Amino acid sequence: MSKPDWSGSLSKFGRYLKAHKIERETIAEGLDITPSYVSMIAHAKARPSFKLAMRIAVWTAKHVKKDGQPAPFPVESWA
C-alpha cells in the first residue's frame, strides 16, 4: 500500500480522506471504483452520483473510526 498523498486543493471529501489517513487505493477497492476517480472526487474535479455518495457514506461508517466510534462521510456533506 502506498502512503496517503493528499495535497493540493482538496474538496471537503479530500480533506476528510486526508484527516483520516485513508489511501485512495483502499477506498477505491471498497467502493469498486478506480483510485484515479477517488482522486478526482477528492480534488473537486468530479462529483459522485447520489448512488456513489450513498456507498461512500455506508463504507466510511463501516470502516472509518474516530475515538472508537464510526466517523462516516454523510451524503449531506456533498451539498
Image (spheres, helix red, strand yellow):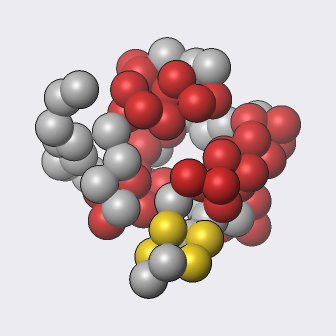
Q: Quadrant of residue 79?
A: bottom right
Give the vertical position of 63 relative to 46 (above or below). below
Q: Residue at x 42, y 32 (%)?
A: 26
Which is nearer the eye, 56 or 12?
Answer: 56
Say which residue appears at 58% left-offset and 30% top-offset: 30
Q: Residue furthest front?
A: 68
Residue 40 can be seen, yes or no:
no
Examine the rendered structure and indicate whether residue 50 appears above or below residue 34. Answer: below
The residue lying toward the viewer, choosing from 9 and 25, is 25
Q: Is residue 55 above or below residue 70?
A: above
Left-right relation of 29 to 43 = right
Where's the N terminus, which quadrant?
top left
* Residue under the point 67% across and 37% down: 48
Residue 68 in sight: yes
Q: Which residue is painted at 75% across and 59% down in the image?
A: 75
Number of marks in picture: 0
Looking at the image, residue 48 lies above or below residue 32: below
Image coords of residue 40 (percent x, y)? 43, 31
Q: Residue 14: horizontal and vertical position, in percent?
A: 39, 52
Q: Is residue 47 left or right of residue 26?
A: right
Please identify the residue farthest to the right as the structure is shown. 51
Residue 62: horizontal and vertical position, in percent?
A: 65, 55
x, y percent for residue 41? 49, 38
